[in-house]
């Protein structure tokens, strides 16, 4: 099979096209014939060395949609021919205090798809069957792929905002365009903050129901009840706090963010909360997929052939598209 492989990370790193053998499933693993794999900003962080890959060489990709091609001897819940989704969380220990408390996202021995385990930038991928997710039938493979990280992490961040009526979203990309639709469906007001001159993304946000869209460097038109930061720029944290009313929550939803600047305590005072999102749980996945089955979420995939993964990552870095990039393998090769 063809795969796009990360051999080293850091400045100027690129994925390399490689011919690899198709792996065999053992134990709890399923072998998936990959239909689509989303491209996430986390993949860029791994490529750039902002996050350290747990193994090299590595096949990235953790928004995998595929069809079960073979199963290991201990698989019970999936059968050959079924379509499944593979998210970021690939394994947790099940016995630590976090796991026992239902917080497996914080497990110190957790493993992650496309970081510890080879991911979906390939024709085939192995996944632990116990961490795979069923996908709503209303989404085809390409439209389902962004649900598996942009949707899931967005959902976990969104849940942390409680009953906030006025919700600010900083960075209007793959996750924000899904969260905006959830919030609108729940009757909330969405305020979208984008790069200063990014009128295209502002228009995109309005098309999805945002009541306002404008530059992140400017003030909010009204005091916000909560804000979620999907952009990886730590300088936005004090801006988001300043835009929020007393008692509001600001959620940092990225796995990596540049350093936060010094800021006056007055921005946090007034019982504002600042918190982060780390990974996801299987219960998050199940809850979000139930919502996605009920709400017609308009994911906006921009497709690339698998072998153009570097182009997809470069376009993501440049903000060249709205929505989410999705790689599609050519199984005819």
Image (cartoon, rainbow, N blue to C red):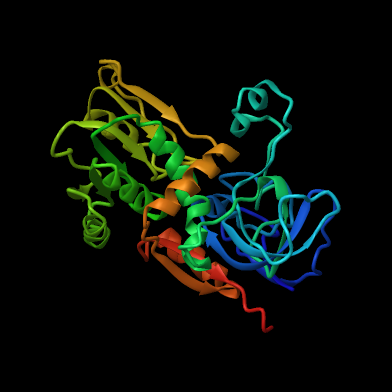
The picture places residue 102, in percent across and down from the top left corner, at: 60, 27
Q: Give the residue furthest to the bottom.
A: 332
Establish if 275 lies above or below 4. above
Residue at 35% x, 38% y: name it.
Answer: 228
Q: Residue farthest to the left?
A: 221
- Residue 29 visible here: yes
Q: Residue at (43%, 47%) from the top-left corner?
A: 291
- The part of the image, by quadrant, that contains residue 82 is bottom right
Q: Position of residue 9 (x, y in %)?
A: 63, 54
Q: Name the quadrant of the C terminus.
A: bottom right
- Relative horizontal placement of residue 110, taking residue 163 as reference (left or right): right
Q: Residue at x 17, y 38 (%)?
A: 219
Quarter of the figure with residue 124: bottom right
309 with respect to 25 (left or right): left
- Looking at the picture, does residue 143 appear above or below residue 286? below
Foreground: 294 or 111? 294
Identified at 53% across, 67% down, the residue is: 141
The N terminus is located in which quarter?
bottom right
């Amino acid at each position: 099979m063809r795969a796009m492989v990360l051999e080293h990370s850091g400045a100027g790193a690129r994925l390399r096209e490689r011919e690899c053998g198709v792996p065999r499933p053992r134990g709890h693993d399923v072998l998936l014939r990959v239909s689509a794999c989303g491209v996430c900003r986390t993949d860029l962080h791994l490529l750039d060395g902002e996050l350290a890959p747990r193994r090299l060489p590595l096949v990235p990709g953790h928004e995998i949609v595929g069809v079960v091609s073979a199963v290991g001897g201990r698989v019970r819940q999936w059968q050959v021919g079924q379509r499944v989704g593979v998210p970021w969380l690939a394994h947790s220990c099940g016995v630590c205090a976090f796991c026992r408390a239902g917080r497996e996202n914080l497990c110190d021995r957790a493993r992650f798809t496309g970081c510890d385990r080879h991911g979906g930038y390939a024709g085939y991928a192995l996944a632990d069957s116990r961490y795979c997710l069923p996908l709503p039938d209303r989404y085809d493979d390409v439209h389902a792929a962004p649900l598996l990280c942009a949707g899931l992490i967005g959902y976990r961040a969104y849940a942390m905002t409680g009953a906030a009526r006025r919700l600010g979203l900083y960075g209007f990309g793959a996750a924000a365009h899904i969260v905006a639709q959830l919030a609108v469906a729940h009757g909330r007001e969405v305020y979208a903050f984008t790069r200063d001159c990014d009128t295209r993304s502002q228009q995109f946000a309005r098309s999805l129901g945002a009541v306002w869209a404008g530059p992140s460097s400017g003030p909010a038109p009204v005091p916000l009840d909560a804000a979620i930061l999907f952009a990886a720029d730590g300088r936005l944290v004090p801006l988001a706090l300043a835009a929020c009313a007393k008692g509001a929550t600001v959620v940092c939803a990225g796995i990596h963010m540049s350093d936060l600047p010094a800021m006056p305590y007055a921005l946090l005072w007034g019982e504002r909360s600042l918190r982060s999102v780390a990974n996801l749980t299987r219960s998050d996945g199940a809850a979000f997929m139930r919502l996605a089955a009920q709400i017609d979420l308009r994911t906006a995939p921009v497709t690339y052939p698998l072998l153009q993964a570097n182009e997809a990552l470069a376009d993501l870095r440049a903000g060249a598209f709205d929505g989410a990039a999705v790689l599609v393998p050519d199984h005819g090769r």
